[in-house]
Amino acid sequence: MVVNLLADKKVGRLVHRHLRTMFAVLNKWLFAFKLVWQANPLAAIITSVLTVVVGPLSAIYLYCWKKVIDGVALWLQGKAADGRSMVVFFLGLTCIVLLVQFALERLIRVMEQMLRLRLTYCTQKQILDHAASLDMTFFETPSFYDKLNRAQREVGSRPYTIISSFFNIARQCFTLCSFMIILFTLSPWAPCYLLLATIPSLIVQIKFGQFWWSVLFRRTPEQRRMDYYQYLLTSPPEAKEIRIFGLADYLITQWQNVFQLFYDQESRFNIRRNLTEFGVLSTQTIAVIAFYIFIIYKTISTPAFGIGSLIMYTQTVERSVNSLSALLGAIGSLYENGLYMNNLFDYLALKPVVCVPQSPTVLPEIIRRGISLESVSFRYPGGDTDVLHDISFEIRAGEKVAIVGENGAGKTTLVKLLSRLYDPQKGRITVDGIDLRQVDPSGWYQKIAVIFQDFAHYWVTARENIGFGQLDFIKDMERIRHAATFSGITECIEKLNNGWETILGKVFDEGQDLSIGEWQKIALARAFLREAQILVLDEPTASLDPKIEYKIFAKFNEITEGKTTILISHRFSTVRMVDRIFVIERGRLIEYGTHDELMANGNRYAELFNRQASAYR
């Protein structure tokens, strides 16, 4: 009895798991339908209606062709008038049916192509919109890139394939029903016989579809690694080092190793699947041949059966088998693609960590008091140690401060927190006493301009590269020139082939590349263009020669006039003009004050300053 109970529980769990999987897949189907409706509702309606209409036409064609054969038989038996009228009428009707069928199939194909394009666009837009809504926490987590890669891998085909499978199922069902009606006139059990003969094929398709989905799911990290090797071998930024250091052969070998792993997996899978399908199809073929023998026997033994009936029934069996195979294939594909849609669902289910509060607090139009860090500690996602430890300080509105320290001290991490790309795990950051967690991030981003140490190189025009700093001014050449003048890039841009409309970088036709120092000037101009109350410059002159650096800092007060300015640097010679200096070491604030005060104290800042200064003596 105990054994029976355990067996019942095991069966119950198995049934529950399969039901849960089926409901999950059903949910994906409903989501795909929602996407289709959003993409092109008119094309969806037209395709659905045409699919219903075109389904029975194949059976009508077979019946008409039977009547043509019967008419020919009458004609040959000496009943020329009856036979001729039957042949002419049904041959004309056959022609009409075929023309209508071909026209409807082409129209369905056009509608489906329109749906596919719109559906791909809508799904890709959802992925991009969702990526834009997520914060930096995700972009530094490998598992996020696995989910993103899986979602993008499916975007071009899976939602459309689900809808295409539904349309195909609908069409094959209507076609099959019309065939089954014809076979029912032969024998009531004939439709059931054919259906039973094709069930093993459906089981095989679902089983192997689920297995292959699990294989692709598990190998996503390796797929990303393979894509990364391919990117390195074809990417302009890495091209120089790869050639100088002779890395090409090594990287190609690494790419080949992952490719070989995938090749071996797919080869074993395809051999196993095709052998199984061969066995199933062999059994199905024997069952169909047996049915043909039955039809031949009925033709010989039943006087009412003519050649036309023989041709109609044999053609109906052949087309029924094909239709059943197509139907079962569509059902298997529907199930399989529903599993793949989990990848898109998993990605879209990600929720931002830095999010908009339910009732966001609105920051004052003008910041009056300033920014305050209160016992702030932070560690990166997946990290096991804090990068910042219990940091507290205040930056007054309109004040110019510098955050200095050696490489790896935590300066750029502070910038990310001040920019609210991350939220601290402990403590809080306030603006005029308002916790940034209570503020809509987009409202805070409007008040701050940041140039990061690893600033972006946009492969667009020089004008757009600077205009990205404030999209409202992307066509305002007066403002763009003004910002470019401050950063010292104007003369360089005006010497380019197409001036301000020259595409930067050599990825696109007629593009021209810049030196790293010139790119940094572009990034500076982007920050200077932005109408923001807070200006954050993370190593703003790290790639500039001393002469250009001196010119920019000579204009520092003019550039930062009226702005709360935070300058991040490990070069102590650039920070003397600020109001106060904060010294960070190993994620801790160890001292702060003016340059003169810190030098007089003779502590860490003075030591670092003197060490750097000695290199120029």
Image (spheres, rainbow, N blue to C red):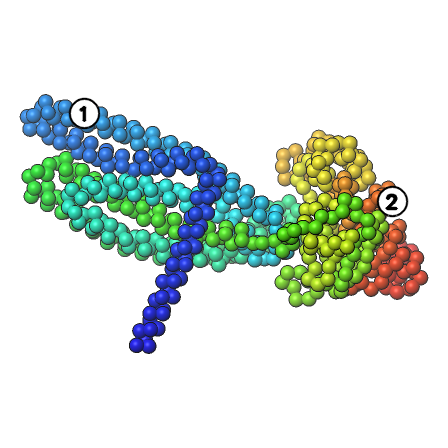
**Three-letter code, disc 2:** Asn
Corner quadrant of residue 489: top right
**SS class, disc 2:** helix
Q: Is residue 111 above or below residue 390?
A: above
Q: Which residue is mark 2?
A: 557
Residue 418 placement (x, y as % from top left): 74, 53
**Three-letter code, disc 1:** Phe
382 left or right, relative to 117: right
Q: Is residue 589 above or below residue 482?
A: below
Task: Using a 10 Å C-alpha cutoff, classify the residue at mark 1 as few (fewer than 14 neighbours), some (14 to 19) or many (20 or more).
Answer: some
133 left or right, relative to 549: left
Evaluate whether residue 518 shows in this view: no
Q: What's the residue at 34%, 67% (across, down)?
A: 11
Residue 411 placement (x, y as % from top left): 76, 57
Residue 504 placement (x, y as % from top left): 69, 38
Task: Using a 10 Å C-alpha cutoff, classify the residue at mark 2 as few (fewer than 14 neighbours), some (14 to 19) or many (20 or more).
Answer: some
Which of marks 2 and 1 precedes in the sequence?
A: 1
Q: Residue furthest bottom?
A: 2
Q: Which residue is mark 1?
A: 89
Q: Quadrant of the C terminus?
A: bottom right
Kindly report the distance in space between the C-alpha atoms of the residues bearing marks 1 and 2. Answer: 95 Å
Residue toward you, 302 or 42: 42
Q: What's the residue at 11%, 36% (across, down)?
A: 306
Q: What's the residue at 30%, 42% (across, down)?
A: 172
